[in-house]
Structures are given as structure tokens and as C-alpha cells.
Amino acid sequence: MERPVPRYVSIPAQHTFLFGPRGTGKSTWLRQVYGEAVWVDLLEPATLRRLEAQPERLREHVGPGRDAGTLVIDEIQKVPSLLPVVHQLIESGAQMQVVLTGSSARKLRSTGADLLGGRAGVRRLHPFMAAEMGGALDLEGALALGMLPVVRFARSPADALAGYIEVYLRQEVQAEAMVRRIDRFGRFLEAISFSQGEVLNLTGVARECEVKRSTVGSFLGIVEDLLIAGVLPVFARRAQRQVVSHGKFYFFDCGVYRSLRPAGPLDRPEEIDGAALETLVYQHLRAWVDYTNRQDSLYFWRTRSGAEVDFVVYGPTGFWAIEVKNTDRIRRGDLRSLRSFRDEYPEATPLFLYRGAEERHVEGIACRPVAAFLEGVTPGAGLSR
């Protein structure tokens, strides 16, 4: 049973699209914020059938003469043809605020749907941040289960996580006929999990899946449109050294990554744990960027000679280079890439995050326990406090 948890996302006093992967708590949070809203739930089969058949029936939900309050349409991508009706309601002079949630941008884009004539803002909801949950972060629990509300509030979180891909992804992919062969898509999800936190090589993934590279490119577009994965671009501003051209791949939540990543006798646990830890930091930084001002950007840095920094945050709020290591000790060799980045960008603040308990400064680099860092990541505040 979900309990109310204050979230850092905010909805402006205007019409808004709220996007986020399934299970991030969009509906739960909006019901807390807009308890008196007119609610149209497109996950409810009868409502879905009625509005698919005749989108104009949306006016019946609003009711005659209603020109104030809030209208929430949940999972708008299920019936994109509702958007022109919503637009007409707005243009008719109704003073209602309209909030539309979505867990996929694919169908809205592919149908050429009218996005309210550019009159709506866009917000994104992410998995929980450590600071939203309050108290000390259970790092081991976060790494094992991730930070999805639908998982963390389940009676059996491990079972909920195991079923997430089946319930929220495979069914949605099948329902929208995104792929012809769901078995191939399943193999792709497993194969690309080995690329978590790595520079993406689509040719290698295609070889592993035994499909064409173009098919893997199409599958990658699907998981990006479903908001469950993304490719992090390389930081190349004022680059004095040659940097790589391809981005790094991440699933959006470390628990979802672990549920997809096969583990066997030939897989080193520390390798999987390291990718999960890096993902946990990644998802917090993504949320921080979106919730702070959406003007900062998240990158990674890697030169062709092999120097790499896991994350670079750059924008009006600040400039940070962040390295994450799944170790409880600080080795000077682990700081080498941060030193190289600082040499090229002395304006940046370097941070080294590790599994130890002690906060130290080594060669001018702040070394912080990763759990303490994540607990302090709050929108609007700097990352090095």
C-alpha cells in the first residue's frame, strides 16, 4: 500500500504534461495534489473503450458549464485523439487547468498528435530520490530493489520488481504493437543490460541478439520512448583532447537494471554491483536536473586515450565532475581521471563517491560516502555541499 510521500516535482499553474515511466507514482502523487480534480483514467477499460470510440465524449466528463478546477487525463498516450478535444476546451475559454500524464511519448509523436498548440509545459517524474524518502538511505536495499514507488511500497518488493518488466513493459509493447516479435525484444532487453553504464555499441548488441543492427536501433528507440532508458551524451565543450563520439547507455532505475541483467557463474558480482551503484547515482542526478531548473545538463566524459569520468553536470547551477567507485577504499589511481578532467577544466568541482564511511579530501578532490551524497541531493541546492 502506497503511503503519501512528498515529491520534488512541481506542476506550474498552467496546462502541463507530466511524463514518467510506469510505476513512478504519477497518478498517486496527482491524486494527493489535485484531490478535487475531474479524473479521466485511461487505464480503466470501460473509459478507454468509450473515449477511443468517440473522443468527443470527454466533454461529458467535464460537464456543462464547468470552467474552473483541474482536469487530469491519466496515460494520454492511450488515446492521442483526445488532445484536439482538450485543445478545443481550452480555446473555448474554459479556465480549467489541464494536466495530462504519459508513460510513452512514442504514440503521441508517431500519430502527429496536437500537443495543445505548444500551450502546455512539460514536467517529468522520476523514481524516488533518497531525500524524498526521508531518513538514512538503505544503500543495500536501494541497490537491490531500486527506487520505484510501485516496487518499494509493494507487499513483496522483490516479486514486484521481478514482475515489472512483464507487467509494465512487455504488455505495453504488445498492446501498442510496437514490435512484431516480442521474444526478440525480450532478448534485446537482456543483451543491452550488459551495456549498462558503458559506451553503447549497437553492432555488438545486434550480434548478441542475432538480429540486424537496424532492429536494435528500433528497439533502443522504443525503450527511450517508454522512458525506461536513455543514452548519456559525452561532454565536449572546449575540448582540448579527442573525446569519444558515442553515448553511454543506462536503464532508468538500478533495480530494473538488476532485474534484467542475467547473473551466472561467469559473472562477477562486483561488476554487476558496480553498474548498479553507478545507476543509482545516475538516476538521482537526472532527477536533480529535471527538478532543479531543467537548464543544467548531464553528461559523461571519456577521451580516446581512455580517461573517463562517470558524470559531468554543467549549467547555470554549477559545474561538477563525478566519479563513482564500488569500493570502500580511496586509491590514488581511482582519482586519475578526475585529475585529468580538472587539468582540462579547472572551473569544475571534482567529486569522488565511494562505499566507505569517511569523508576526506585527497589532492584537492572531495571524497564522499555515496550514501551521504545521495541523501544530500536535493533540487535547487548545489551538489558539492
Image (spheres, rainbow, N blue to C red):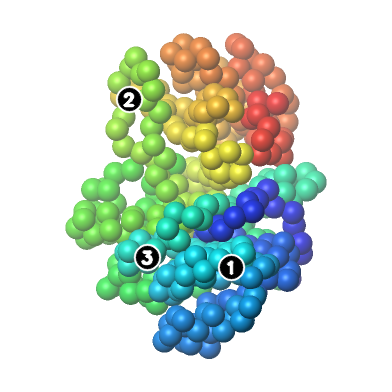
* Residue identifier under label 3: 113
Q: Tell me the SS state at disc 1.
A: loop
Q: Residue furthest right?
A: 135
Local crowd at mark 2 within 10 Å, few (<14), some, or many (≥20)?
A: some
Identify the residue at horizontal 61%, vertical 39% (top origin).
292
Indicate the amino acid at tag 3.
Ala
Answer with the quarter of the image where residue 378 lies.
Answer: top right
Q: Nearer the viewer, mark 2 or mark 1?
A: 1
Q: Rounded to the nearest whole Å, what is the CA distance between mark 3 and mark 1?
A: 21 Å
Q: Is residue 256 visible?
A: no
Marks 2 and 1, the one that precedes in the sequence: 1
The answer to whether the residues at label 3 and label 1 have Cβ atoms under 8 Å apart is: no
Position of the N terminus by quadrant: bottom right
Answer with the quarter of the image where residue 331 lies.
Answer: top right
Q: Rounded to the nearest whole Å, what is the CA distance between mark 3 and mark 2?
A: 38 Å
- Mark number for residue 94? 1
* Residue identifier under label 2: 243
Where residue 146 appears, as percent x and y from the top left, is: 60, 54
Where residue 25 appears, as percent x and y from the top left, is: 63, 62
Circle count: 3
Position of the C terminus by quadrant: top right
Quick check: 198 left or right of 164?
left
Q: Nearer the viewer, mark 3 or mark 2?
A: 3
Identify the residue at horizontal 53%, vertical 88% (top origin).
46
Indicate the amino acid at tag 1.
Ala
Q: Tell me the SS state at disc 2.
A: loop
